[in-house]
Amino acid sequence: MLLTMFLLGLLYVGFAGVLFAAGAGAAVMAVVIAVFALAQLFLSDKLALRSMGAKEVSPEEAPGLHAMIERLCIQADLPKPKIAVADTDVPNAFAIGRSQKAATVCATTGIMNTLSPAELEGVMAHELSHVKNRDVLIMTVASFFASVASMIMQFAFFFGGGDDEDGGLPFIVVLLASAMVYVISFFLMMALSRYREFTADRGAALTTGRPSALASALVTISGAMQLVPETDLREAERMNAFFIVPATVKGSIKTLFSTHPPMEQRIARLEQLEAQLQTA
Amino acid sequence: MGFLDALLGGQKKLKTAAPDRLFAMTTAYVTMATELEMISTGSAGIVFQPLATADFEQILRDTEELLAGTAQETGTALESSDDEHGYRWIILRDPDFEDLVVAMNTVSTELAAGGYGDRLLAAVFPFDKGAANDSASMPNPSRGRRVYFIYNYKRGAFYPFVPAGGQQKRDSEAEMRVKAQLSKEGIPFEPELSRWFPLWEIPL
């Protein structure tokens, strides 16, 4: 997922660079960027659901899940989102949608079978917090700004170099420089994503009043992650950014590249919240 | 929640309860009985998240004692139960509707005073619609139905909920009709239909 996202963004920036080199004006560029951003905002939720094999479920099909989410919505003061279920053993859940009203919350059959009701409630509250905090929109806007930043970079090089043809920098330098800008903004985006995961954990604890249930869910999920079949893991790889816990837990190094904070840190913060609750 | 809150990572607290509007029911129920044949079942419930903290249980016990004290005058009976979703219900029974609302208000006020007002989910008033004889030539589809009036504490608003029998089925038509019929009664109805959350298996 991470690599895909990264390459996709890079392609995006490269494409814009080529377009610009081909002589497209600033106005054309702006339109192209805006179309990309809008397409991302309006289509990504449907694509994400389809790639997970998730289907929207009616209250008759999943009465327990609907009732649980309805009560959490009252508590979190949210309109009811669409609810989807993905038929996979990978225990996970995610929320998508550009606004609170167009949100979809999805759980896998794996997570519904693995977790206790209180744990599942914590996880769904976490996903609803993402909806409440408009995290999908914010991450889309952030990635948009990352692209715009490298775009400005390209303009600066082309125009900053002066008018004479010989004084302009070679195209490859411009491309490399905008790629650099993109890489830096990419890491900033990852940091933003990790911060928003913590926020969603806190939101979930607030909504359910049971921080320890979410902590216990995180432990259960990360334990179960290592047991699920390899094929399912690969299948799930693409979806990591939306997941409550990334599907490939390798345990080390990747903190800087990660969309999610380390499990231990999340649990430690939830423990703090529980302590606050008990002593308040 | 404002834009800045969203940007900085969401709210620090849940919305707390808006209990005062509960009393809108005390004027509306008369019209409901006389004009719409909607009769209170003589019971009402309040549903909330029970927290596993020491003082929360203490506040609940104090509240129950307080209600038991006033019950000697009003005759309000009280019981509590946990449902399968992990929420607690306090069920109040009293043939006098106004006493019911007052008792409900006592529960929410006590929880709010203890700092747990944000745990309140909803207050529920069940009514039986048109249980009386039906000699009209036109069959009325909403006869003999249970109508719940649900008060969402976070929103400070009411909405009707009519289960249609069968799993997770509701009669949205009947719900909207009830709202229209009571539009002049000054009940603060929830304007957004997407927030007319059902509550299944209400123990009332």
Image (spheres, coloured by chain):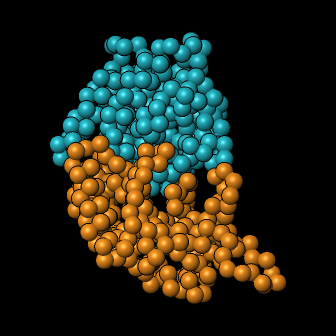
Chain colours: A cyan, B orange
Vertical position of residue A40 compared to residue A251: above or below = below
Count of number-bearing discs = 0
Q: Quadrant of residue A185?
A: top left
User: Would you say residue B190 is visible in this rendering?
Assistant: no
Corner quadrant of residue A249: top left
Q: Is residue B64 something one can see in this rendering?
A: yes
Rendered position, B14 above or below A238: below
The spot of residue B16 in percent (x, y) is 31, 60
Residue pictured at 42% horizontal, 34% vertical: A119
Closer-to-camera residue (A179/A196): A196
Between residue B81 and residue A248, name the one nearer to us. Answer: B81
| Residue B111 rendering spot, x and y as whole percentages | 28, 59
Question: On the picture, is B183 further left or further right than A275?
Answer: right
Q: Is A238 displayed left or right of B99 in the figure?
A: right
Residue drawn at point x = 33 percent, y = 27 percent? A261
- Above or below, A104 against A154 in this view is below
Tell me the residue at 55%/38% (across/down). A106
At horizontal 56% and vertical 31% (from top left) the residue drawn is A108
Residue A47 drawn at (x, y percent): 62, 35
Q: In the displayed image of the protein, which residue is found farthest to the right? A: B137
- Please state the horizontal and vertical placement of residue B3, each as a whole percent of the image: 35, 55
Residue furthest to the front in view is: B72
Q: Is residue A74 above or below residue A179?
A: below
